[in-house]
Image (cartoon, rainbow, N blue to C red):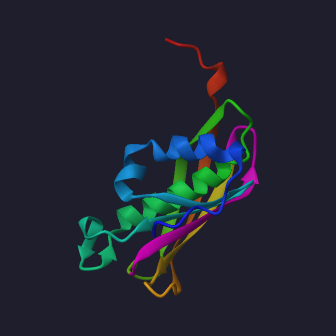
Amino acid sequence: MTTEATHSSPQFQPLEQLVLAMPMARTLGLAFRRIVPGAVEVEIPVLEAFCFRPGQLQATAVFAVADFAAVAAAATLLAPGWVNATVDATIKLLAPAQGALLRARGRVVSAGKLLTICAADVYAVSSQGEEVLCATLLGTARNINAAARQPQ
């Protein structure tokens, strides 16, 4: 779980830094594994602190990793000076979130100037690397021109 991410493009380093600076991302142990235009892969370890029964994550952690993946994927298509935030998301839990880690693959469904529709599939990954689809999320991210915001 401490392997290096497979991305190295300097254009996505600010996105990764922004996401990993969020307290929830740090608390979950979120790590980026892949960032390309329109797609992101992130992982979190299965930690007992977030389990409702031994080894099985609560839905809150599953939603969080899916949301981070989907909205970060949407952010990969934003122009410099723009950021985004979740405005809506629906998750469907398909199987128990248990194993060594969760791997979420986010992608852009439809990119717009104001809103981006994004999605993520979340896989429970065993210690042997076997993946089981445990959740899918469809979300909407609001695109915000941070450069145009005036200090108050």
Number of marks in picture? 0
Residue 36 position in % (x across, y down) = 72, 57
Relative to residue 124, is residue 68 depicted above or below?
above
Question: Residue at 48% of width from left, 80% of height from top?
Answer: 125
Residue 129 position in % (x across, y down) = 51, 84
Question: Residue at 24% of width from left, 65% of height from top?
Answer: 49
- Direction top: furthest residue: 152
Left or right: 78 in relation to 2: right
Q: Residue 97 is drawn in which quadrant?
A: bottom left
Q: What span is colored magenta in the figure?
A: 99-115
Between 86 and 103, the one lying in front of the other is: 103
Left or right: 64 in relation to 120: left
Left or right: 25 in relation to 147: left
Residue 65 position in % (x across, y down) = 47, 61
Residue 61 position in % (x across, y down) = 38, 63
Q: Is residue 105 magenta?
A: yes
Between 59 and 132, the one lying in front of the other is: 132
Left or right: 125 in relation to 10: left
Please, what is the dominant secondary structure of the magenta stretch? strand
Relative to residue 92, is residue 29 depicted above or below?
above
Q: Is residue 104 magenta?
A: yes
Q: Quarter holding the N terminus?
A: bottom left
Q: Residue 6 is drawn in which quadrant?
A: bottom right
Between 107 and 10, the one lying in front of the other is: 10
Can see residue 139? Answer: no
Question: Residue at 45% of width from left, 58% of height from top?
Answer: 30
Relative to residue 123, is residue 29 depicted above or below?
above
Can see residue 105? Answer: yes
